[in-house]
Amino acid sequence: MGFHPEGENVSISRFESMLKTNNVLFFDAEEFESIANHYIETGKIALGRKAVNLGLDQHPSSFNLKLYKAEIFIFENKFDLANDLLTELYEMDPHNEEIYIQKANIYSKQDNHKKAIELLESAIDLTEDPADVYSLIGMEYLFLDDFKNAKFNFMKCLEVDDQDYSALYNVIYCFDFLEQHKEAIDYLNMFLNKNPYSEVAWHQVGKQYFDLKKYDKALSAFDFAIISDDRFVGAYLEKGKVLEKLGRFNEALENYQITLELEDPTSFALLRMGKCYDKLGSDELAIKYYSRCVHEDPLLDNGWIAITDFYAKRLNYQKALYYINKAINIDGENVLYWKRYAKINNRLKFYEEAERGYSKTLELGNYELDTWINRADILLQLGEHDAAIINLTQAMEFYPENAEVAFRLSGLHYLKGNDIQGRYFLINGLKLDPDYVIILEELFPYPFSKKEVVSLITKYSN
């Protein structure tokens, strides 16, 4: 449904004034349509409903206002009411494409996407503007995970309207999902033959080359995007990423700096600038931009991780701990934070806190081998032998044939006097990889010196 933007602001002002004063003013049907469309488009459904109902009071035969009423019913999941109204409208005008589109919307909301596609395909034959309908069909195919047909329909949309950048992004999304980078580049080049100054298309070409690690070609594409629109922030950001990959950190910084001048600073640009200064050895500037990054977006985990890792690499574990604690206070469910918290506390020999960190890491679903092993070693350090055995037994569910786990379990069982279990895990570890017997030597010197253990090691090593 179209609407007439001329005088729209005046109509909306009059309408809102009418609602405040309870004075009933007259609007023609097209004004009500424009007002209803405005509120529906901006998500103010309650006001849209008022506009439609008042409009139908004054213009009870308005076909388009009834269509808007059906659309509001659909938005509110009142599908039976919407269907009844659309059936009534169909009898009045069976060739109105909007009826098919709204009926398709009902089926889509009910997860019957194939039926929605059938109705939308009928709408194509009736509409004078098929681009939007092709786009809707493409979205239905996306709901079905049918990326091939989704891509085809978004392409059809672009054939009709080559300025529909939403459709272009969706085409590339389908190519990416299908891992068809070369095909995506071929399509974009064909698109650029007709639209040589499409900054969005050049930008997408650059991203495809970046994914293929063809950085020089990616750089050229982003340069063309900037030539097409020298205020295109996304192109400067992507160009900066390419320059980083090429080790040209000063040039990358120049591009990130341009983005700060074009619009409000983004946390991504600030983070990348910190990384560049870090690589260039400019510690003071690296910290400055990392700090600006986490100030700009405290929820960006990459920012907190960058500043924590910066201090950890320089062995300043107290500072690293300070920043990772700040990060955990903001998001206590971030597994990457807890893993760093555990490692840093371990370096500082704060073993109880380190164990808490690894325990939380496992609780949050990080089942990497080093998490289990590091926690076990800390529990051993704390004298919590039973807890270490439970931890490693759980680890075996994920890593049933791992020599590092087996030798640790062997040593722990020997320490507790469970020689049968100790022998079982020792033999298991020796069969898996005898080189890891060094674990027994370093962590469990007493079991390692036992005659039985020496004998078994000699036997399996030979």
Image (cartoon, rainbow, N blue to C red):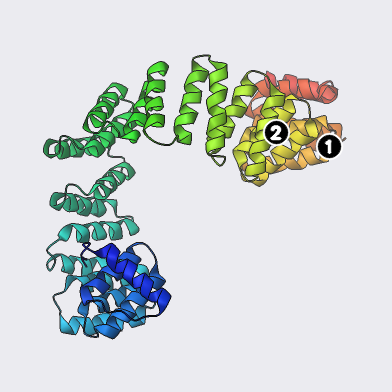
The residue carrying mark 2 is: 342
Q: Secondary structure at mark 2?
A: helix
**As displayed, is residue 48 above or below residue 61?**
above
Q: Residues within 10 Å of mark 1 (few under 14, many from 20)?
A: few
At x 36%, y 69%, the residue is 109
The residue carrying mark 1 is: 384
Relative horizontal placement of residue 139, taking residue 252 as reference (left or right): left
Residue 63 is at least partly visible in this image = yes
Q: Find residue 126 and report its horizontal and vertical position in percent.
A: 12, 69
Q: Residue furthest right?
A: 417
Q: Find residue 162 and report its horizontal and vertical position in percent.
A: 17, 47
**Quarter of the image where one finds residue 229:** top left
Q: Secondary structure at mark 1?
A: loop
Q: Earlier in the sequence, mark 2 or mark 1?
A: 2
At x 78%, y 26%, the residue is 349
Quadrant in which the N terminus appears: bottom left
Whether residues under marks 2 and 1 lie with C-beta atoms below 8 angstroms apart, the answer is: no
Q: Residues within 10 Å of mark 2 (few under 14, many from 20)?
A: many
Foreground residue among 44 and 21: 21
Q: Find residue 11 and report its horizontal and vertical position in percent.
A: 28, 68
